[in-house]
């Protein structure tokens, strides 16, 4: 670290003095002053980190255990993006005495791939921004002073593997009298189905709509202040889940409920949705859940029928109250009789719309009546707002087109992020998936293991150990034991 401090004394402090003088000359440039101070501090941070990495590399070169298996081949400069800026440091390439394999052992200690250009912190920052705004902004914000292309961000997003069961919960099973499973779907536009140019357009409409599914489980509503309510212990599930994968989605939901909740304490599971075909699979999978039509769609079809049957605002409101009253009372026959009577004299197009609305209410009559009868335990639904906040705000609120792979991955990332998942842990999870069991030879380069090995062989290699200990400062020795960042070679 001495070199970094010297660098800061020679460059950083004069720079700070200069911009301080400029600020006193014109205090209107306060924001510019802050930006310049930040740049100098980040530059100093890059030098400190780079110097520490070179010290770690020196530790590898001087390790007696390393010398048993590897010999120094050459040196090269490594540049890698980090959250504080570009890090530049010298590293050593070693050659295995037996296999003749060459490797940068410091890269293995740090967990860098063979051609890594960015550290895990930058990858996590890319995901953090990409999951909220755009690929372009994610590339600009990832590393101070550097820019990552949109294509690189896109490949990074698509390459993420989301771990199954990433919803975190308490150690023991929770107790809940009522549990609510709500499902709905969002819509996003595809750039193409299988290849570019295969989207067909008819009367200014393109057949490029793609359904994105969202399911969430919660324990009801809770006050969050200022006359606002939120969902208690909500957990999300989502993605494309096309065809047979629909069953996979519902199995994930069922597994989560089984692991998190005590079945003997649960009275009912209420399943709220708009009654779509893919959602019915959820009722079958969960077994015993009671279907409830969500309030948004009930009111949507009531208003549609009232609007078709009334030519003035007063008449529409009157019709709405009538329909609402019949539903509240369970008077299905009166509703059907009114619909038959009112459609006489309508245009054929409006008659068809009225029949479709009535059919929807009839098909979901049990779910509608269940909501009416259980107002205390079923006091709302929020599927549309959750579709907006969890999916649509990133996938379709502004004009954009996706391929299926990118759309599915972004939807899964949004769900993971909304569930409170750590994006840094997600990046590290990708490495864990690829890690294989280490051989005895590969384990030698952990900094802690090197010191432990050298202590163990102290009697045999006494003079060499003392020479090594003398060459390493007490500050570096302390870091070897304390800093686990360089422990564990891939």
Image: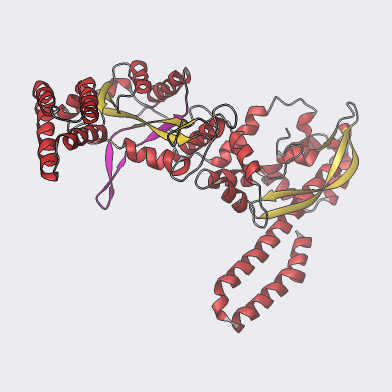
349 is within the stretch colored magenta? no
Q: Residue at x 67, y 46 (%)?
A: 482
Examine the image and state in which quarter residue 236 appears: top left
Looking at the image, the residue that sits furthest to the bottom is 25
Depicted 263 relative to depicted 160: above or below: above
Depicted 319 relative to depicted 268: above or below: below
Taking the image as drawn, is residue 485 in sight?
yes
Segment colored magenta = 218-240
Residue 143: x percent and y percent?
64, 52
Residue 163: x percent and y percent?
54, 29
Q: Residue at x 38, y 24 (%)?
A: 257
Q: Nearer the viewer, residue 172 or 463?
A: 172
Q: Residue at x 79, y 53 (%)?
A: 473
Depicted 114 relative to depicted 175: above or below: below
Q: Quadrant of the C terminus?
A: top right
Residue 466: x percent and y percent?
86, 45
Left or right, 374 with reference to 232: left
Q: Main secondary structure of the magenta part?
A: strand
Examine the image and state in which quarter residue 381 appears: top left
220 is within the stretch colored magenta? yes
């Amino acid at each position: 670290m001495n070199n970094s401090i010297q660098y800061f004394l020679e460059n950083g402090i004069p720079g700070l003095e200069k911009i301080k003088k400029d600020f006193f000359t014109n205090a209107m440039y306060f924001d510019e002053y802050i930006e310049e101070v930040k740049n100098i501090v980040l530059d100093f941070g890059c030098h400190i980190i780079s110097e520490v990495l070179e010290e770690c590399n020196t530790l590898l070169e001087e390790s007696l255990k390393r010398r048993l298996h590897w010999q120094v081949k050459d040196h090269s400069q490594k540049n890698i993006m980090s959250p504080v800026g570009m890090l530049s440091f010298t590293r050593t390439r070693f050659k295995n005495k037996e296999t003749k394999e060459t490797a940068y052992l410091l890269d293995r200690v740090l967990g860098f791939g063979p051609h890594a250009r960015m550290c895990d912190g930058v990858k996590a920052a890319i995901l953090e921004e990409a999951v909220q705004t755009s690929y372009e902004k994610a590339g600009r914000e990832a590393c101070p002073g550097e820019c990552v292309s949109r294509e690189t961000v896109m490949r990074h997003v698509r390459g993420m593997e989301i771990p199954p069961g990433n919803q975190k919960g308490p150690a023991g099973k929770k107790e809940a009298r009522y549990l609510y499973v709500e499902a709905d779907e969002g819509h996003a536009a595809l750039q193409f189905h299988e290849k570019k140019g295969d989207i067909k357009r008819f009367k200014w409409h393109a057949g490029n709509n793609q359904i994105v599914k969202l399911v969430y489980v919660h324990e009801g509503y809770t006050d969050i202040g200022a006359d606002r309510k939120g969902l208690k212990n909500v957990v999300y599930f989502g993605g494309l889940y096309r065809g047979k994968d629909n069953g996979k989605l519902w199995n994930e939901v069922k597994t989560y409920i089984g692991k998190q909740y005590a079945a003997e304490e649960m009275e009912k599971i209420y399943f709220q949705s708009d009654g779509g075909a893919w959602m019915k699979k959820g009722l079958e999978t969960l077994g015993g859940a009671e279907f409830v039509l969500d309030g948004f769609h009930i009111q949507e079809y009531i208003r549609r029928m009232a609007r078709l049957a009334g030519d003035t605002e007063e008449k529409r409101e009157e019709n709405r109250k009538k329909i609402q009253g019949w539903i509240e009372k369970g008077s299905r026959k009166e509703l059907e009789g009114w619909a038959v009577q009112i459609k006489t004299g309508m245009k054929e197009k409006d008659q068809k719309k009225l029949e479709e609305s009535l059919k929807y209410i009839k098909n979901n009559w049990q779910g509608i009546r269940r909501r009416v009868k259980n107002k205390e335990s079923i006091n709302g639904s929020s599927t549309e707002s959750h579709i907006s906040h969890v999916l649509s705000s990133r996938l379709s609120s502004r004009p954009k087109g996706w391929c299926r792979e990118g759309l599915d991955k972004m939807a899964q990332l949004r769900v993971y992020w909304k569930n409170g998942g750590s994006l840094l842990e997600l990046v590290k999870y990708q490495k864990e998936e690829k890690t294989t069991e280490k051989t005895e030879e590969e384990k030698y380069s952990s900094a802690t293991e090197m010191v432990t090995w050298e202590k163990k062989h102290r009697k045999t290699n006494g003079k060499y150990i003392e020479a090594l200990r003398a060459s390493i400062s007490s500050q570096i020795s302390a870091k070897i034991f304390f800093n686990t960042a360089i422990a564990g070679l891939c």
